[in-house]
Image (cartoon, helix red, strand yellow):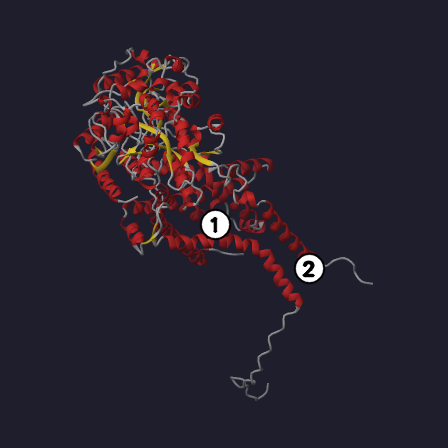
């Protein structure tokens, strides 16, 4: 009588065959998932737009796609909201996509990346702008030339700015009252600022920081450099750009404009740079501000809204941020950055850059125009999460619920101070920023640290600027 | 007893002809095929996800590549650059310092707690401690670091607030060159020691009770017993814990990246941070690969050294 039961070995063998077959079947079944082919709109001829995820929630994405579909029903659109903590993280992810051969057609790019994209990846918009000049006349009339100029590189325009943020000073009313101080005037000076910090410190407990700022390129030490009439890198303007200025801006507005900014020779050891650092180091030593941490300033909203910080530099984006954190519109206010040698302020702007690799450049241009329309931006920026690039959008109604009272400061930073300019962001911006953050941290350890740290910064900046990206 | 002399060396028998290689039966072939089938997914995985990237990194380290343009051959230029770049050299120093301090602290804490938990304690309480100590390990390092960044904030952090209650001045945990590395190590160890702890608990359970009982009869108690018996018998587990701990510590990234971003200055910049920054921020993928290759060599060398030394210090029952 034979044993009809299979042996252990037979069971194992058929088990292995079965497992192998199951693995192959599973792989085949999920092939689309594994290769990303099941992503809606992928490889279906859609125009792909990469945006900074956190700034573009589902509602914003819907706004863009549905609105664009109404205007251009013939163009398929896919918004790829890339999640990233900041612009450099965002660029890293975009570049990874490009390396992987899945480059988007359009990328939302801030000042930090304008020149890098322009130099290596972007398509100048000049011909389209000239062609559709009549259509764009209203747009340029509504947008400050400084913002437009910040999107130019070597005479060509690479982006239409849709938003910007200048580093103004936010002040907490509760803290001002506690210190018995009034709201500062528009032409307040650095010394007024220092005196205010001292008053705040005197009137508050140990768990209070009069001035808090984040160590980063935008809104870190750079506003102080600008106020002291200097910069991290020697700043000049590229020739050209007349084709744009002459077409869209009156003589007064186009005076001194060029073909975009050039940031070249590092000047970290410049006496005025050292003076600015020395001033910040003195604030740290006096306990009027702390040694700054890196980051994107997110952790600031909570401590500012609860009155544990008196003053901090931020842009229009904070109006929405503080409101979201539950702060009433009359609990804080905003003023220009204090004057030192000048009252020149800094900003960062953003818009859509068209990639050279795009096969749908005409459609992409249509999207760029659509994204810069007033109705689009009104729907997109309804929560005051940024400052619209269009002057006409800044109204009392917009800031009625969120505050601040002095909301005109946001755009007047450009209108009343025409020399206000973008943060220094050459194509080597990533390394420049890294060097700045690194040495700022050590420079502010004590006043004696400033000189040596700036000398090291100068050396590292020179190396960074010598490198071809 | 006989007078027969036994020759010192026996005459050699002629060597037997070598036996013909046994023919593999169909059953043997089936077994081999089966084994191959079972191993194939793992082998393919290792080749695709480990071997190929390693070879790719070595190749890429010989090129300049910025993602945007085509790669251009650089020869040893990336390596020369690495050895003359002060940031890279400092990051290697930081990483080695981090490795020594973090792993030592991790092992000591894990061992002490494992001995404590393994002592006289109700079973339910032992389970509670095991879970509690292991819990941080299953959380994301980035998430933990974000929370810790708030806790250790000089101005608004809970840690300084608590210290303030007992009259201690605020400590710049993350913004002082002297304190930042210690803080990063503290956060790292808090998250990682649970792994070594579990290994030690397992190792302690494998030590036969009779040995301890015999030692007790001989009068060994407390520290003497642990030094003379527990530690030698636990040495294989210690080896595993230290090898894994060192490999992990040499690759530390999330904690310094989130907590201090490598600062202040370069005080907490680690090798993997430099790799990330070179590649994804500065678009120098060749240089980043060169640093990666050097880190790979360093990890291999340290691990080989550990195994070499283990022959002297590790005792197997």
Rendering coords of residue A362 (x, y %)? 41, 35
Above or below for B250 versus B262 = below
Callout 2: helix, strand or loop? helix
Looking at the image, residue B167 sits to the left or right of residue A74; the answer is: left
Query: Nearest the camera: A88 or A414?
Result: A414
- Are dots 2 and 1 on a single chain? no
Q: Position of residue A252 (x, y in %)?
A: 22, 21
Percent from the top left, x then y, of residue A277? 22, 30
Q: Quadrant of the N terminus of chain A?
A: bottom right
Whole-angstrom CA distance, mark 2 to mark 1, is 38 Å
Question: Which quadrant holds residue A178?
Answer: top left
Residue A49 lies left or right of residue B208; in this view the side is left
Q: Residue furthest right?
A: A1
> Between tags 2 and 1, which lies in front?
2
- Residue that numbered label 1 is attached to: B238
From the top left corner, tell me how far across and down residue B181 is, in percent.
35, 38
User: Which residue does the image show at 27% across and 44% down from the upper left?
Assistant: A467
Using the rendered image of the protein, determine whether residue B99 is visible from the camera's viewpoint.
Answer: yes
The C terminus of chain A sits in image quarter:
top left
Is residue A406 shown above or below A277?
above
Q: Is residue B236 left or right of residue A463?
A: right
Q: Chain of mark 2?
A: A
Q: Are marks 2 and 1 in contact (CB under 8 Å)?
A: no
- Residue highlighted by disc 2: A9
Which residue is more in the foreground, B247 or A227? A227
Q: Callout 1: 10 Å neighbours few (<14), some, many (20+)?
A: many
Q: Secondary structure at mark 1?
A: helix
Question: Is residue B297 at all visible to an observer of this figure?
Answer: no
Q: Which of the chains bears the disc numbered 1?
A: B
């Amino acid at each position: 009588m034979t044993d009809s039961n299979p042996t252990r070995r037979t069971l194992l063998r058929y088990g292995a065959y079965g497992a192998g077959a199951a693995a192959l079947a599973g792989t085949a079944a999920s092939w689309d998932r594994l290769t990303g082919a099941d992503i809606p709109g992928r490889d279906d001829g859609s125009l792909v737009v990469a945006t900074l995820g956190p700034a573009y929630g589902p509602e914003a994405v819907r706004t863009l796609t549905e609105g664009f579909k109404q205007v251009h029903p013939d163009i398929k659109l896919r918004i790829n909201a890339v999640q990233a903590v900041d612009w450099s993280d965002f660029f890293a992810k975009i570049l990874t996509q490009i390396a992987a051969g899945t480059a988007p057609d359009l990328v939302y790019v801030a000042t930090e990346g304008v020149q890098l994209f322009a130099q290596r990846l972007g398509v100048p918009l000049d011909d389209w702008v000239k062609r559709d000049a009549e259509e764009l006349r209203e747009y340029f009339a509504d947008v400050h030339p400084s913002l437009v100029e910040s999107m130019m590189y070597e005479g060509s325009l690479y982006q239409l700015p849709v938003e910007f943020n200048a580093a103004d000073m936010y002040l907490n009313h509760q803290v001002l009252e506690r210190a018995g101080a009034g709201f500062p005037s528009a032409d307040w000076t650095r010394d007024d600022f220092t005196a205010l910090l001292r008053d705040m410190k005197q009137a508050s407990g140990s768990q209070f920081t009069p001035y808090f700022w984040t160590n980063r390129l935008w809104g870190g030490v750079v506003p102080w450099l600008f106020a002291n009439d200097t910069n991290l890198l020697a700043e000049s303007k590229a020739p050209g750009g007349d084709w744009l200025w002459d077409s869209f801006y009156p003589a007064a507005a186009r005076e001194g404009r060029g073909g975009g900014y050039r940031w070249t020779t590092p000047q970290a050891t410049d006496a005025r740079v050292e003076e600015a650092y020395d001033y910040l180091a003195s604030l740290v030593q006096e306990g009027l501000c702390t040694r700054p941490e890196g980051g994107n300033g997110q952790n600031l909203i909570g401590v500012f809204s609860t009155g544990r910080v008196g003053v901090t530099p931020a842009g229009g984006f904070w109006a929405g941020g503080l409101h979201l954190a539950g702060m009433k519109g009359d609990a804080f206010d905003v003023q220009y950055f204090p004057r030192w040698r000048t009252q020149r302020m800094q900003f960062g702007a953003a818009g859509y850059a068209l990639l050279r690799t795009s096969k749908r450049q005409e459609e992409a241009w249509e999207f760029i125009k659509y994204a810069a329309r007033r109705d689009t931006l009104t729907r997109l920026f309804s929560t005051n999460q940024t400052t619209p690039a269009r002057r006409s959008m800044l109204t009392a109604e917009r800031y009625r619920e969120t505050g601040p009272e002095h909301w005109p400061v946001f755009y007047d930073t450009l209108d009343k101070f025409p020399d206000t300019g973008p943060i220094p962001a050459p194509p080597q911006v990533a390394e420049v920023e890294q060097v700045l953050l690194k040495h700022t941290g050590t420079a502010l350890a004590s006043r004696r640290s400033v000189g040596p740290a700036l000398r090291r910064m100068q050396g590292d900046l020179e190396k960074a600027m010598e490198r071809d990206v | 007893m006989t007078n027969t002399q036994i020759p010192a060396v026996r005459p050699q028998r002629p060597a037997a002809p070598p036996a013909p290689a046994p023919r593999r039966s169909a059953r043997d072939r089936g077994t081999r095929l089966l084994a191959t089938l079972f191993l194939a997914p793992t082998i393919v995985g290792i080749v695709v996800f480990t071997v190929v990237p390693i070879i790719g990194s070595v190749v890429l380290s010989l090129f300049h590549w910025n993602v945007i343009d085509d790669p251009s051959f650089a020869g040893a230029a990336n390596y020369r650059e690495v050895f003359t770049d002060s940031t890279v050299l400092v990051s290697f120093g930081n990483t080695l310092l981090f490795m020594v301090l973090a792993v030592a602290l991790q092992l000591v804490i894990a061992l002490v707690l494992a001995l404590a938990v393994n002592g006289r304690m109700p079973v339910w309480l032992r389970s509670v401690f095991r879970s509690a100590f292991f819990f941080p390990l299953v959380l994301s390092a980035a998430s933990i670091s974000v929370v810790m960044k708030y806790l250790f904030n000089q101005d608004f952090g809970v840690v300084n607030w608590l210290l303030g209650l007992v009259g201690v001045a605020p400590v710049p945990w993350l913004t002082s060159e002297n304190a930042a590395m210690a803080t990063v190590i503290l956060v790292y160890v808090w998250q990682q020691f649970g792994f070594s702890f579990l290994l030690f608990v397992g190792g302690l359970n494998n030590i036969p009770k009779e040995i301890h009982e015999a030692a007790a009869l001989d009068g060994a108690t407390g520290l003497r017993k642990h030094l003379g018996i527990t530690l030698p018998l636990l040495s294989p587990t210690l080896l595993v814990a230290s090898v894994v701990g060192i490999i992990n510590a040499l690759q530390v990234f999330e904690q310094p990246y989130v907590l201090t971003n490598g600062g202040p200055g370069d005080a907490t910049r680690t090798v993997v941070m430099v790799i990330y920054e070179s590649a994804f921020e500065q678009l120098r993928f060749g240089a980043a690969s060169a640093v990666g290759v050097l880190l790979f060599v360093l990890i291999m060398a340290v691990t080989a050294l550990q195994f070499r030394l283990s022959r002297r210090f590790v005792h197997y029952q």
